[in-house]
Amino acid sequence: MSFNELLDHLDHGAGAQAAGIRRGYGGPPPRTVAVGSGLTRLRCASLLKPLYAWVAAHRIADAERWRRHAEPAIVLSSNADTLGLWLSVGPRVILDDLCERTGVRWEPPNGDPSRFGSVEVAAGEVAAAYAVLAQAAATGDPVAETVLGWMAEVPDSQTFGAREAVGRPGAAVKCGWYGGPDETCLRTHAVAVLPNGGSRASVVVAMTALPYTDAHEREVYRERVTTGLSVEDRHEKVAGELLRGLMTRTMAELGHG
């Protein structure tokens, strides 16, 4: 299905983006893909957790302490452990370090910088940052290798079928899902990192913010969140098909179809 077919029928209040990058020495020419509808920037906290963990490692002298927080932040999408890294290193330090390593500049959230999940990004920026992470891992960065290894361990129950969408059962992936009490959309996102041998790698990103306006459904959703119950099935119902469609189309546009 084409990008136009995927995006043309979105509600006027919806937002969706997809981006991909293929690059690497000795491979085919670099290629980038980007498409979007709606807002140019979205919040996608969980997609950034592996990147935060990567740059936080050299700021935390105790490697075991770093691992104790970084692994569950990535594999289980633990907000508490991500917050532990975010606050112990410092939001500005983490984002400055990411910019230095990847060239991608993100700003701390307005109002309360402790809210790591409020950083706003574009899909193309996320893809660019992960491409640097992937190539760092391919050329011997042990922390980057560890981070991608943990992404490969993210359970399928948290991936919304992202691995199947990109056609790589063992792909390193990270997904996120959230609907704030002040929002009328559910945000659902995914990134997949695909090493292609040597320094070659591809990255696929999809980000969605789709209307979830039924008052009763939103109330039930909030109750489930506050009591610690899973809400992935709500996000699958609202966004799963679109998310996978965007990832599959992006892969095809990168030349992997």
Image (tube, grey):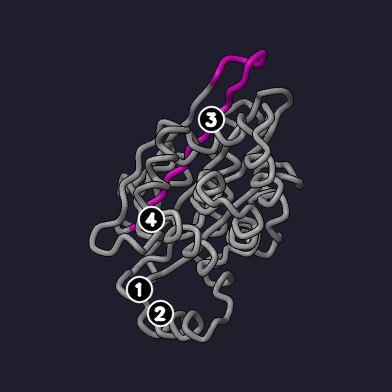
Mark 3 or mark 1: whose residue is earlier in sequence: 3
Q: Distance between the residues labelled 1 and 4?
A: 19 Å
Residue at 49 percent of width and 50 percent of height: 48
Does the magenta run of residues contain 24?
yes
The answer to which of 22 and 89 lies nearer the viewer is 89
Instruction: Name the secondary structure under disc 3.
Output: strand
Q: What element carries label 1?
A: loop
Tell me if residue 44 comes above or below residue 253 in the rendering: below
Q: State the residue position of label 2.
A: 218
Query: Element type at marker 2?
Result: helix
- Is 43 placed above or below 221 here? above
Residue 218, position in %: x, y?
40, 79
| Residue 5, position as x, y percentages in the image | 47, 43
Crowd class of label 2 (few under 14; some 14 to 19; many from 20; radius 10 Å): some
Q: Position of residue 226 (x, y in %)?
A: 47, 83
Give the label, 2 or 1, closer to the camera: 2
- Residue ID for mark 3: 21
Magenta-highlighted residues: 14-30
Label 4 environment density (alpha carbons within 10 Å; few <14, some 14–19, many ≥20): many
Q: Mark 4 points at which residue?
A: 43
Kind of residue indicated by mark 2: Arg
Of labels 4 and 2, the one closer to you? 4
The answer to which image quadrant residue 148 occupies is: top right
